[in-house]
Image (cartoon, coloured by chain):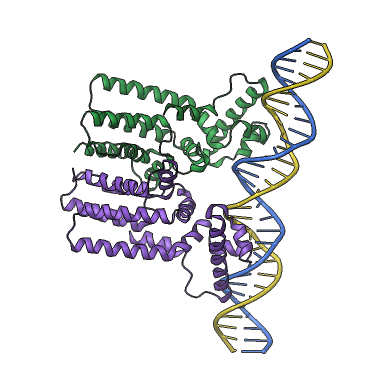
Chain colours: A green, B purple, C blue, D yellow
Amino acid sequence: MISDNEIEWANILPPAHERRDATRNRELILAAARSLFAERGVANVTMAEIAVAAQVGKGTLYRRFANKGELCLLLLDENLRVHEQEMLALLQRLAGENAPYLARLEHFFGHVAAFTDHHMALLFEVQQAGIAPAMAGIDPPYFSFQHMTVAGLLRGARSAGEIDHSLDLEMLTGLLLAPLTPPYFRYLRERRGYSVERIGAFLGQLVRQMGQ
Amino acid sequence: MISDNEIEWANILPPAHERRDATRNRELILAAARSLFAERGVANVTMAEIAVAAQVGKGTLYRRFANKGELCLLLLDENLRVHEQEMLALLQRLAGENAPYLARLEHFFGHVAAFTDHHMALLFEVQQAGIAPAMAGIDPPYFSFQHMTVAGLLRGARSAGEIDHSLDLEMLTGLLLAPLTPPYFRYLRERRGYSVERIGAFLGQLVRQMGQ
DNA sequence: GAGTTAAATGGACTTGAGTCCGTTTTTCTG
DNA sequence: CAGAAAAACGGACTCAAGTCCATTTAACTC
């Protein structure tokens, strides 16, 4: 399961020995993208525009980023790492307190919802592009970090007798994460007008429901 | 809620008084599309190819169908109507037998899963295009028929005391239907290798779980 | 059945994604 | 500090989606 994560990042992190021009251009591109995104919104910027702004050929741009989603993922990289560390710390604390697994899940959902909301525009692009292009649209295990965490907590909950033994945890994991998937999340927020809190709370409520 | 449905169909059904050439071309287009789709798969056929095969200009094609999804929706029209009638009949029968609402839901999910599987390729295009283009990706109330039905059954279940009173039924409806959404469904089937039965069964199990 | 008008047509055009490949730059080796 | 090999570059090119509008055609009127 870890391997998913590694595959996902492998294409995106700069290689060990990068040529000087490559480094320079990578930075030009990221800076140009950041600035254009800030100025006009992620969705309204084309790859060609980024190339022009970065004073770089289209081929160069695509050599490094197969699509806008990959570029956005790298832009998010730092935030993503911090977020994951915080979640890990949170979960460790809750584990130390011997909190019920379902309560840990509830906390986790709340934080992920907040994170997703905060970075919606970039996350949406990442999702749209899809790590595996064939699966553009929905990719429930999306960031495998989320998937692994929820799957782990659900297994814990089952072992601890907090939820029914017969539940299909693999599917349940994906289902619980679906509303936190950028397109679904955006739909809930923008089309339905739900607050971040309502979305987080719903998942918490649902998960508590599993425990009867 | 009905109005969603009406809006959805309004653009797609031929207008009351259609000119003869329009009718002829509409039929040429549908026939050409059907044949190309059968021959090479829905996903591998472009709009331009359909126009050529139908011996019709691109403008004509787009005048009638804003995108491939709309074309696919019309191709599915008959099947969709039959499916809806069957579901209505099924639900009426179950209502007559005074079956628990959760049992009715379980049946419904099973049938919808089968239908979705059967028409996956076309449904996927419909979904991709999105009725509202902005919402390409996921549109949980997708076919509002499904949404209305599930929402109604859940309300019934709540009134009958089969599920917790505090559950956010609006969100729950969307969540339960998410796995039946073409991209998610395809992901489960093709990437995860789940059987149609497993998907249907999971939803049934989940819904039963709601009833403790 | 000629004239009028509104609808419908077809294909050139625009736009953006993504690829390809001849040229340039870096880095390594002697 | 050559000279060669590998990596990176850039922009022209392809492909498909979707738009636009000058021209054609059906339908209605007298």
A171 lies left or right of A24? left
x%, y% of residue A187? 40, 45
B131 lies left or right of A88? right
x%, y% of residue D12? 75, 42
Q: Is residue A161 above or below residue B200?
A: above
Identify the residue at image location x=48%, y=35%: A122
The total number of labels drawn is: 0
Identify the residue at image location x=44%, y=40%: A139
Is C16 or A195 nearer to us in this picture? C16
Q: The N terminus of chain A appears in which quarter of the rendering?
A: top left
Is A68 or A163 nearer to us in this picture? A163
Identify the residue at image location x=60%, y=25%: A27
Q: Is residue B57 above or below residue A32?
A: below
x%, y% of residue B83? 36, 62
Q: Is residue A13 visible?
A: yes
Q: Is residue A181 above or below residue B20?
A: above
x%, y% of residue A120? 44, 37
A71 lies left or right of B208? right
**Looking at the image, which residue sits at the far left?**
B161
Q: The C terminus of chain A appears in which quarter of the rendering?
A: top left
Is A5 or C8 nearer to us in this picture? A5
